[in-house]
Amino acid sequence: MTSSITGHTGLICLLGSPCSHSISPMMHNAAFEALHLDYCYLAFDVDEEALPAAVEGLKAMHARGFNLTMPDKNRMAGLCDRLSPAAEIIGAVNTVVNDGGILTGHNTDGVGYMRSVKDAGFDILGKKMTLLGAGGAATAILVQAALDGVAEISVFLRPLSRFFSRAEETARILRERTDCKITLCDFGDLDLLKKELSESAILTNATSVGMAPDEDACPVPDASYLPQTLIVSDIIYNPKETKLLKMARENGCPAFNGSYMLLYQGAEAFRLWTGMEMPVEVVRERFFR
């Protein structure tokens, strides 16, 4: 946020319910201040029912754009005039750009994850990923990884999961539009899980298993599933070190959490709104140490 708000200050905001816990306002306002951009980022508690009215209001006020958090991401996809390729496949939007009343929806979660992998010093393009989960974050990662050029992705989920049919449809679309080989696997088949991990470059836990307050939970039975050549990532960032990450590091595996996925999904939204790169080192130093 600029040091003084004037009649020229542009509005960008976050819609969701609840949203008071979000660090997005702090991140983006710090970035605007660092680059001397005349924008202000605010958070508004807007539930799914009120979303259409809120969107119309933001259009009328010529807001430059906005972020969405739960429960608004899925419904927003149907309120946009255009969708990015990733958002179209995912069916959920977390970032909207307003160009003269034309709303373009994006999903930057997958971009954030892929940039966090690169930031950690790894290149997984052309390689194999094992992905745990099929919820919103997992779907965004699956789609972006396939679009970016990951060669093969084994997705582990429960066959009776409410996400199973969506995962099947997402996999079908990605097989048609990319060269990525996608296989849906039963999370209960531990022998298959061990086999897939032995062949993978990276394990991505996109479930909530291990998130506070259930820090003792782990999506992988034991360290024998984690060869030392395997990169282990967890999108959870509270706690900073999940049981999975602790087990991986003790076994000699490179490992990282979801903090920088959060940073880089915000950085991508910032770029879409402003056309400039977020000063990630400034934001990282203030909010991610």
Image: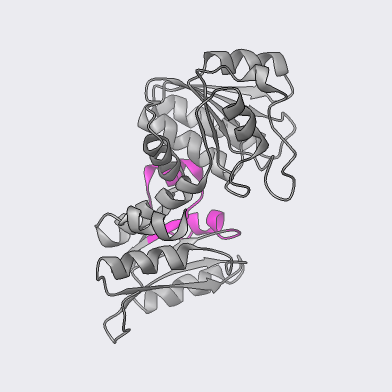
Choose between 165 and 181: the one closer to the eye. 181
- Display colour scheme: one colour
Residue 56 versus residue 138 in the image, above or below: below
Q: Is residue 126 left or right of residue 197?
A: left
Q: Position of residue 92 (x, y in %)?
A: 51, 50
Residue 44 x, y percent position in the rendering: 53, 73
Visible in this render: residue 2?
Answer: yes
- The residue positioned 56% from the left and 33% from the top of the image is 169
Q: Is residue 256 left or right of residue 280?
A: right
**Which of these two is toward me, 208 or 89?**
208
Q: Nearer the viewer, residue 59 or 145?
A: 145
* Residue 155 quadrant: top right
Vertical arrangement, residue 10 with respect to residue 147, above or below = below
Q: Position of residue 217 (x, y in %)?
A: 74, 37
Q: How many marks?
A: 0
Q: Is residue 192 left or right of residue 16?
A: right
Q: Is residue 157 magenta?
A: no
Q: Say which residue appears at 50% left-offset and 28% top-offset.
A: 254
**x and y percent of residue 64 in the render?**
33, 69
Seen at 57% across and 67% down, the residue is: 19
Q: Is residue 36 above or below residue 166?
A: below
Residue 209 placement: quadrant: top right
Residue 81 in sight from this viewpoint: no
Q: Which residues are magenta?
A: 70-96
The residue shown at (67%, 36%) is 243
Quadrant occupied by the N terminus: bottom left
| Camera-side residue of 154 and 252 | 252
Q: Is residue 94 magenta?
A: yes
